[in-house]
Amino acid sequence: MSTREKRLLIFFAAAGFVALNFFGFNFLLGKRAQYQARLQESERKLESARMIRDSTSQIAEEMEWLGAHEPEPAAQQDVQTRLQQLCEREARSSGLTIDKQTPLPADASEGRHYHRARIQLTVSGSEEALYRWLDQLNSPDQFRIATQLRLSPDKKDDTKIDCTATIEQWFVPTPPSV
């Protein structure tokens, strides 16, 4: 082989070596990026598992509370009627006047464990009586709460207040008949 052919062979060998290193380096960079992405995903999962582990005691307490306070299954109409009667009775005992009451459609979305019976009442009376009434109705232990309130001064008497309240009662529906 002549010196020119030897130089050409060395040149092609060096060019091949550089090309292989270039492609190998890019391949390794791609693999490194994949491993880093997997590492970050694993770190996120680990952090999520740690958060779940740390909140386990709180969730257990909440589940125990639910087990102790969960209402018995009932028909939507029965719950709606009992809620309306309770609201009327408590309003009268608090000294409020019921101006209007409107049963609202129940929230009975499919797949939910709890459904909600709802009623909207418009009452008027003293501010103290209104707060007493709301305090009697809001009962987390009985799954009942005033979810919406609109307060305004009474147009006829400045010492009274008008309130439109939406009261909701969460309940477990009766299982469907087979």
Image (cartoon, rainbow, N blue to C red):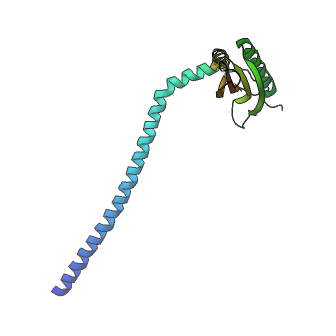
Answer above or below: position of 13 versus 54.
below
Which residue sits at x=34%, y=59%? 29
Quarter of the picture containing the N terminus is bottom left
**x and y percent of residue 108 in the render?**
74, 34
Q: Is residue 33 visible?
A: yes
Q: Quadrant of residue 130?
A: top right
Q: Is residue 1 visible?
A: no
**x and y percent of residue 125 in the render?**
69, 18
Quick one: 48 or 127, which is closer to the camera? 127
Which residue sits at x=47%, y=29%? 53
Judge left or right: residue 53 versus residue 117. left
Answer above or below: position of 142 versus 31.
above
Which residue sits at x=78%, y=29%? 103
Quick one: 140 or 173, which is closer to the camera? 140
Judge left or right: residue 170 versus residue 34. right
Report how many numbered discs are placed on residues in the image. Answer: 0
Q: Quadrant of residue 155?
A: top right
